[in-house]
Image (cartoon, helix red, strand yellow):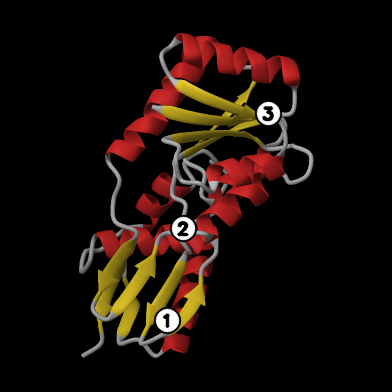
Amino acid sequence: MRILIAEDDPKLLKSLVHLLEMNHYMVDGVSDGRAAYDYASTGEYDGLIFDIMMPEMDGITVLRRLREKGITTPTVFLTARTEVYQRVEGLDAGADDYLPKPFSTPELLARVRAMLRRKDNFTPDILHFSSLTLNRSTCEICFEGKEQMLSGKEFQIMEMLMQQPSMIISTERFLTHIWNWETTVDTSVVWVHISNLRKKIDALGAPVRIRFVRNAGYILEEIA
């Protein structure tokens, strides 16, 4: 397995490269965001470990550009414990996990193994429901050549609905799956994102709707 590490602290970068090599991974290490993007763009890596705060280009920007390019390599962000808003932004950009600093060696290795399992269980980049498609690489919904870009949370909600077509998904399930780490989120936030999704589906003219089922949840269905 080949891993790319991007970390601007030279001592930490050296330690991380050494640790992963000792655990039988092939590792490349870079110290700025521009190099991270150039290396990762080759698509030759099984996993990416990015620090968020880096010179040239921050880790979140790097990952967004990689996802826009269609690079789906699983990614873990390294963050300071206080960077809560950046963790949220990183997950929305397409990260699979984050690891707060300082971290223990066993935890890092466990996160790496989990990240690499995602690659082994890779799912298709395009989901279909009726004539509507969801592109997982670009976070866009498409219908008859027209496209609408989704925000991170809109994408996650739409992905859940399209993975379980014609099934009701409760508000609580959305909260648990998408906002499980943020316990103060109000249920109304789900309604706001679904309202935005409905507008984007309507803008495409797709024969699909997200219907609210009272006391149950939301369901994605075709319009007869």
Q: Which mark is residue 175?
A: none
Q: CA distance from mark 1 to mark 3?
A: 40 Å
What amino acid is labelled 3 in the image? Glu
Of the two numbered discs 2 and 3 on the same chain, state the one appearing first in sequence: 3
Q: What is the secondary structure assignment of the residue under circle 3?
A: loop
Q: Position of residue 171 (x, y in %)?
A: 39, 57
Question: Mark 1 or mark 3, which has the lower sequence index?
Answer: 3
The amino acid beneath tag 1 is Ile
Q: Residues within 10 Å of mark 1 (few under 14, many from 20)?
A: many
Disc 3: which residue: 7
Name the residue at 46% across, 70% down: 140
From the viewer's perspective, tell me whether residue 61 is left or right of residue 200: right
Query: Does residue 54 lie above or below 42 as drawn?
Result: above
Where the C terminus falls, by quadrant?
A: bottom left
* Residue 70 numbered mark, or none: 2
Residue 216 visible (yes or no)? no
Give the secondary structure at mark 1. helix
**Location of residue 147 with respect to 104 vertically, above or below:** below
Whether residue 82 sits left or right of residue 207 in the image: it is right
Task: Determine the image quadrant of residue 117.
Answer: top left
Q: 129 or 189, which is in the foreground?
A: 129
Q: Are marks 1 and 2 in contact (CB under 8 Å)?
A: no
Location of residue 67 in the rendering, given as x and y in whole percent from the top left corner:
51, 55
Corner quadrant of residue 64? bottom right
Q: Which residue is mark 1?
A: 201
Element at label 2: loop
Tell me where residue 15 appears, x and y as whole percent.
63, 12
Q: Is residue 181 above or below residue 166?
A: above
Drawn side of residue 56 relative to residue 22, left or right? right
Residue at 31% from the left image edge and 82% from the top image edge: 208
